[in-house]
Image (cartoon, helix red, strand yellow):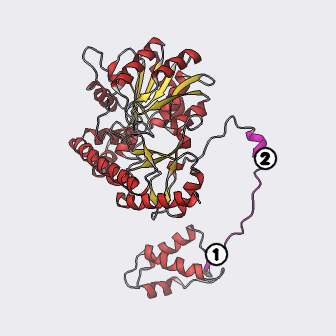
Amino acid sequence: MINSSSENLVLILRDWITQAPAGTQLPSTRQLVAQHSLSPVTVQKALRTLIAQGLIESRPGIGTFVRAAPIARPYDYGWQTAALGIPRQKLPQVHASQRTLPNDFITLHSGYPDRELLPERLVKAAFSRVARSESVLQRTEPAGLPELQSWFAQELAEQTLPGLSAPTARDVIVLPGSQSGLGSIFRALVGEGHPMLIESPTYWGAILAAAQVGVNLIPIPAGPHGPDTQELDRAFERTGARAFYAHPNFANPTGVQWSPEVSERVLEIVKKRGAFLIEDDWAKDFGVNADSSALAAREDSGHVIYLRSLTKSVSPAVRVAGLIVRGPARERILADNQAQSMYVSGPLQAVALDVVSQPGWRTHLRSLRQQLENRRDLLIDALARHVPEAHLQQIPPGGLNLWVQLPDGTDLRRLERECEARRLAIAPGATWFPAEESGQYLRLNYSGPNPGAFDEAGRILAEALQAISR
């Protein structure tokens, strides 16, 4: 083969090896050089690659041979049963929304936006610049890169109501992603065995983080305008809880944005009860028909702990989030987070800061808004055409998901299997409830790849529903 590269030769020889019996001798280096018009160095490089992959072995002075496949033998890990003991709580290893599936699947299950919705050019340019900087060799302060702390503080300060004290960089802790932050917040402010109020349904990762800490979750029903504030007040009184975890803007999974009345009432309640509101503004950059309006910008007495992630909007590879918290609570959370992760990678912080500081970042967010609206409406139309029995409580004004209710009695496990057999991935809603689910729901991500396949997804879902109803 003329002008074959080392990589091409590896592929050619690998195909040949799979057909050859173990122990078969490969052609000599000289023969391979002549056959493929390659240099001896290129051939040797290909052979070293195949040796490293365990496909061939070199016998000095004799030649190179197809390696016999190792005989698999079972291992006995029974001793670990006694060493590990009984788990306090069995936790899921990988959530359904985190699974990676073959490219021919229509994926509505994921929790991340498609690559087309990311500021790819800005991210790549930022990594290139940061790679040439001193940050690749330095550690940062435990609370984060000062310039990035300032950016997070300034972003919230721009929303802060007149007359209130705006947050400063000293109030910010930079975290290695919001999931890490949730664990530190729950440990520092709530603690094992203590109650915490939480919206129902809510983010599965928060439920998982609470379970890992050992926090006792008290679900508060949430509707199209936010949580039931009467039940919230009663739950604070009944349980003595001192924290409430919530998504006031574009809730995951429902997409709900709290009404102004609910927002004001929740702030009144947490102040009256001497409690914290843990405000997870996960979808700050994903407004569609509305903007994120942080409750942390409406008070300055330290009742609101504000968490804002850049991971989904900048890049899944840039796991960086900011936590804004005032008073002694900040020191407790910082101490816990430092014990868990010491500090956040300086280069990742520098990349995040570079991206959000570019003029193109604002341009990207404006374009993203329109793209999300188009995708959301495409999926809504597909469901309306093919699955009229699917009920959408409201059109979400932001976020990445549709929260769809199916008829009572729908077997979601069977439905999921029937859909996957037809190359469609969906996410049953049970894991978004901190206790029993209040209905049969699906969370469908409209920000994933290939929105042109949404109509086909609706057709498959209808076909799967029909299959499980027989």
C-alpha span from label 1 to label 2: 33 Å
Query: Closer to the observer: label 1 or label 2?
Result: 2
Question: Residue 332 in the image: x percent, y percent?
Answer: 50, 21
Question: Residue 198 in the image: x percent, y percent?
Answer: 51, 28
Q: Nearer the viewer, residue 322 or 26?
A: 322
Tell me which corner region of the image, top left, top right, bottom left or bottom right, holds residue 16.
bottom right
Local crowd at mark 2 within 10 Å, few (<14), some, or many (≥20)?
few
Is the stretch drawn in magenta largely helix, strand or loop? loop
- Amino acid type of disc 2? Trp
Q: Is residue 80 magenta?
A: yes
Residue at x 57%, y 83% (from the top left corner): 26
Q: Is residue 92 magenta?
A: no
Q: Nearer the viewer, residue 60 or 148?
A: 148
Pointer 1 and pointer 2: residues touching (CB < 8 Å)? no
What element does badge 2 sit on?
A: helix
- Say above or below: 175 vs 416: above
What number of labels is visible?
2
| Residue position marked by numbered label 1 in the rendering | 67
Label located before the other in sequence (1 or 2): 1
Q: Is residue 167 visible?
A: no
What element does badge 1 sit on?
A: loop
Q: Nearer the viewer, residue 352 or 204?
A: 204
Residue at x 59%, y 60% (from the top left corner): 470
- Amino acid type of disc 1? Arg
| Residue position marked by numbered label 2 in the rendering | 79
Question: In this rendering, would 66 be left or right of 271?
Answer: right
Q: Is residue 74 visible?
A: yes
Tell me which corner region of the image, top left, top right, bottom left or bottom right, holds residue 22.
bottom right
Magenta stretch? Answer: 65-84
Quadrant (top left/top right/bottom left/bottom right) for the N terminus: bottom left
Question: Residue 151 in the image: x percent, y percent?
Answer: 30, 31
- Say above or below: 311 vs 140: below
